[in-house]
Image (tube, rainbow, N blue to C red):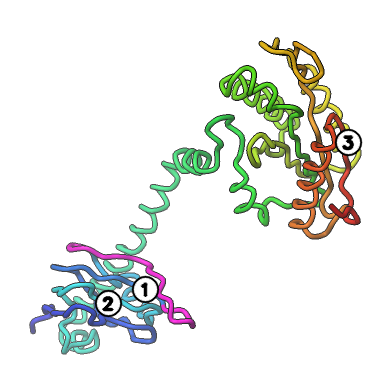
Amino acid sequence: MELAGVMQLKKNELLFFPGKKADHLYMLYEGFIKVFNVHEDGREEEIALFAPGDIIGDFDFARGAEYNAHAEAIEDSSLVVFPDVDLTLDDIAMEEPHIVSKLLLNSAAMVTGRIKSTRKLLINNISWVQELHRKAYEDPGTGLWKQTFLNDEINRLLTDPMALIMLKPDRFKILVDDQGHETGDTAMIKIAAILKNITRKLGRGWALRFKSNETGLLINKCNETEAEALVRFLSDSIAAMPPVYLKKTDEHGKSIFSFSGSIAWGIWPLDNKSWDSLFNGTYQLLMDTWKEGGKKNARYHKEYSP
């Protein structure tokens, strides 16, 4: 009995589809096979792409399960199939039961080995994965978390109570126009260091950069009393930054630029049960406070109407 065979697939021809029993094991010899799901709206979601030498369907075959996805040749392809297309495992079991037993045992071992290998790969490279994750969300200029990190992860991060503190340095344009962007970048690095030092001392929370020179903190397990203390500390720390001597006097005739900041803050869900409303309202309050002259700490409340 010839146990294995060769299967030819034309471009766009299906190898299997959802509901089909996984009663064959395939090895791709030539071509490429994509595995995908089809959503209700007709949109395809690719799951995997197999190249020559890859084994296809081993996990489902080992379990004797039904496929839950489509597999399609994306070009003319050749596969080695076991058992041959006209055979089933039951046919082989009648004449060669030891072969079937050994095959199923090897299939299970192969799947187990693949799971172990994948797990080992992840464990061995977990620091690399964490570093990649951090780099993707890190602001290169300051080392703070980007706002995209907050947008992507907020549902996972939210814990009651959560303090959101936003900071915008006052009169920053005066400093940059007089000293240049390099001095402005240095000042942002110093502000970032203050924010990161706060989270480091607390042992929790995230120091963030939102837009332009707007930065801030997201502190978990932080009630309003602690948050208010952090706001005062942040305001005092910004004011304590070394002043910069200007080349030209400002509109008030001053030749020294002293740092100060506008701060807006709120507590989720105390001040608003909707995180999006709390975030957007706090940001608008920050901008309004800054436009009014700054050097002020403002508490957000859900009745606030910009």
Nearer the N terminus, badge 2 or badge 1?
1
The residue that label 1 is drawn on is 36
Secondary structure under tag 2 reads strand
**In this view, the mark in front (2 or 3):** 3
230 lies left or right of 1 = right
Callout 3 secondary element: helix
Side of 267 relative to 6 (left or right): right
Q: Is residue 121 above or below residue 23?
A: above
Q: Earlier in the sequence, mark 1 or mark 3?
A: 1
Where's residue 278, x and y in %? 79, 53
Across and down, in percent, residue 47 comes to: 38, 67
Between residues 120 and 270, which one lies in front from this camera angle? 270
Front position in the image: 104 or 242: 242
Whether residue 270 appears in this view of the structure is: no
Question: How far apart, in angstroms, are the residues tagged by discs 1 and 3?
Answer: 51 Å
Vertically, is 182 above or below 57? above
Toward which corner of the image does residue 54 lie, by quadrant?
A: bottom left
Is residue 296 found left or right of 83 in the rendered image? right
Q: Which mark is residue 21?
A: none
Q: Give percent across and percent down for residue 298.
A: 88, 39
Looking at the rendering, the stretch of residues picked out in magenta corresponds to 38-53
Q: Secondary structure at mark 1?
A: strand
Amino acid type at image mark 3:
Glu
Q: Name the side, left or right, on which 241 lies relative to 300.
A: left
Above or below, comparing residue 276 to residue 165 in the picture: below
Dividing the picture into quadrants, the one containing residue 274 is bottom right
Mark drawn on residue 228? 3
Residue displayed at 16% across by 80% down: 10
State if disc 1 and disc 2 touch (CB < 8 Å).
yes
Residue 29's quadrant in the figure?
Answer: bottom left
Between marks 1 and 3 in the image, the one whose residue lies nearer the viewer? 3
Mark number, residue 72? 2
